[in-house]
Amino acid sequence: MQEIELKGVVVKFPFQPYKVQEDYMSKVIECLQDRKHGVLESPTGTGKTLCLLCSSLSWLLVKKAQLQMQVQTADCLDQVASGNDYVSQFSKSLNKAGGKALVENPNAAWENPKIIYASRTHSQLSQAMQELKRTAYSHVRVTVLGSRDQLCINPEVAAEPNTMNKIHMCQAKVKNRTCHYYNNVDLRKDDASITDNILDIEDLVKTGTKLRCCPYYLSRELKQSADIIFMPYNYILDPKTRKTQGIDLNNNVILLDEAHNVEKMCEEAASLQISSTDIAVCIDEITYVMEAMAKEEENPPDFNSEEADKMVAKDFTCDDLVVLKTMFLELEKAIDAIQIKNREEGDTYPGGYMFELLAKADLTQGKDQLVIDKLDKIILYLTTVTGTSFQRKGNALQKFSDTLRVVFAGSANANYRDRIRKCYKVYIQKEQPKKASNNAWELKNKINKTEGKLICYWCFSPGFGMQNMLDQGVRSVILTSGTLSPLKPFISEIGIDISVQLENPHIVSEKQICVGVVATGHDGYPLNSSFNTRNDPKYIASLGETIKILSCILPHGLLIFFPSYPIMKRCQDEWQRMGKWSQIENAKAIFVEPQSKHGFNSLMNDYYKKINDPTLRGAIFMAVCRGKVSEGLDFANANGRAVLITGLPFPPLKDPRVILKQRYLEENRVPGVESLTGQQWYQLEASRAVNQAIGRIIRHKNDYGAILLCDCRFDNPSFKQHLSSWIRPYIKKFPHFRGVVKELREFFKYAKEHSVSITLSKFWNIFYVLNNIFITPDQRKFFVRLRFRTFVKKEHLESFDEYVEMMEGNF
């Protein structure tokens, strides 16, 4: 381990950090010391996650020491005040490194801050936890939060397919103490296999199964004493989930990794939609409970039976049900009375209209929590009642309960209504009937021909959710990703004070990157996937021929990204009809990203097998921007030697939400203040999706690859400036297709001859063999260096040492 001092904090790092890594860690520590918020961009392959963990945890250990000393030296204040002894000097150094102390009164109770590390998916969290195991900070107390879908091991509950029903089944068993896995949590939570290890989701499930204790509630117990908590970032950004999971943000540090999706997540977490059908089903569910209670009074259940154990006490009365049913009937009446003036596009209202609509059913601020509490109790009853067709229902009531939580969240704040008026719009359109539907509302209204409504309550300001999070007393927020550029509009959108910024370069050299705009195909036909030309047979044929030729030149793995699934499907169908598909397949095996998650993992494994098959020339993976392949997957080395972008993935122009977002940005622009226009936001949505797709390749400092932008619109300067800063200097415009072919051949020839990654990758098998020989790590390293020194260029020896250290960490 290397030790480096940054801003008074000693950071232990697995190897000597590069300058970009030192710069990154310094910015992290600056945020934490000074209670600031930061936006830090560092390209994939620069060790961003490792730097984030090492710097934040090194600061946390100093901060804990500072707070502990502040309490324990309360009786030594005279010595500290003298400023000339060891206690004083040590205290000063801790205060400098830890930042401003939170406990002003040394005699007051103190509590250590926690680090909350959040990313988009659990696979990304697992990768981060694996990184943590490699560091000198693997001894800190760690936990990861997940859902019951991932963590529940109770056979009956785990078998329930509906998530909300699963939650209520679990709650009922916990309340009645009929889940022995939950009952064992207190007994097992201090077991060494739990406290002495870093357990990701899979590890928690395995350990919980072995110890017969609930992984879900175990992780919640562990978070009380954890130094760092890993969780998906919707657990933080969604107020409903935050409350459900019992996540305390006060005085804690939030690290939002892969934060390029945070804006959208903030808006979606604060938005909702509810329909006439939802309200009708709520009425039916309340009616059913009223009838069920009447039957129970006539025929009380046998509480000595096994089924009675599954029942929960009804914490509501018949009068409560009457009040709720009346409320829903009034709300249904108010929604039916809405006249949609714009029949085709729908009508738009100010955000405050939602309060007016609910008030017609006597649902106003102050009453919302009473209604939510009653609904939750009724849902629990519906979920656990047995022997009926309504067993495990209550989904509509749950949706309405969540609606109230969103609409009235933060309503106690003085300026809440003003923020709603500024950040929200209510959009109402006709409810589209479902095929072969027999839902309550449609059956009831076929006779009187009442038109169903879909009411959308949409937030258009990510800053609304971010500010709501900061209102919980957060110490610092750091948003980081490899694709945040350009930073100014990103910071403008998230709407909080960002005083620390960083836009890191890549650690690879220009010899490892080939970036080009391919404006025309082999036949000279313009490559342009805009709405007006993307269905042009000549364009599709030219793009197919371009891919066919490039797949013969580009080695190993080739990723091809399309703007959307329909466009990818149209190209696939046309190429198969033309015979181009089989021609491309003759060069490389082809894999196509499915729209559903089913079978995706096995498809990825098949792709990797084709890449590593020495009898083949690699493989092609055709995917979609913003799809599963473009987010978080690693195509390092041969798995991704080139990425080809076939067009600009703009959002659907006529989508009501897209239209209203652009209108919102225009309406809220302030003269003299730099902010996004609607058109700029629209372009940024496309460029960020492209940047994310590009980031799948060139995953470490010895990697290399080609980035081909196969649409003439990429040559537009306004779009180029929105690409990641690390690739902008290397973008070339090829006047004709022959130039593309020539450039790629020269690039890959040079890369093959000079790339250290090719040489080093051959050492893995040798290292694997040596690991099974009873020699020390130093002897192993010396043997490998001695055997292969003549094959490694002098300038690559430093990289070789790091590679060996990395291999050591894998055994």
Image (cartoon, rainbow, N blue to C red):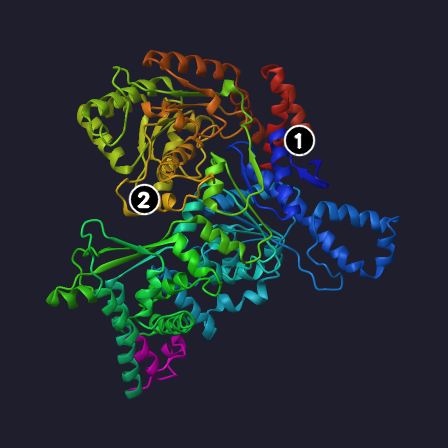
x and y percentages locating residue 600 in the rendered image? 35, 41
Residue 1 falls inside the magenta stretch: no
Q: Residue furthest left?
A: 447
Q: In terms of secondary structure, where does tag 1 sit?
A: loop
Which residue does the numbered mark 2 point to in the structure image? 658
Q: In terms of secondary structure, where does tag 2 sit?
A: helix
229 left or right, relative to 612:
right
Of 93 and 594, nearer the camera is 93
x and y percentages locating residue 810 in the rendered image? 58, 37
251 left or right, relative to 640:
right
The disc labelled 2 sits on which kind of residue? Answer: Val
Quarter of the picture holding the N terminus: top right
Q: Residue furthest front?
A: 671
Disc 2: CA contacts within 10 A as few (<14), some (14-19) or many (>=20): some
438 left or right, relative to 488:
left
Of 264 and 54, nearer the camera is 264
When asked about the image quadrant of residue 10, the answer is top right
Looking at the rendering, the stretch of residues picked out in magenta corresponds to 299-325
Determine the residue positioned at 50% across, 27% down. Answer: 726
**In the rendering, which numbered label is found on residue 16?**
1
The disc labelled 1 sits on which kind of residue? Answer: Gln
User: Closer to the camera: disc 2 or disc 1?
Assistant: 2
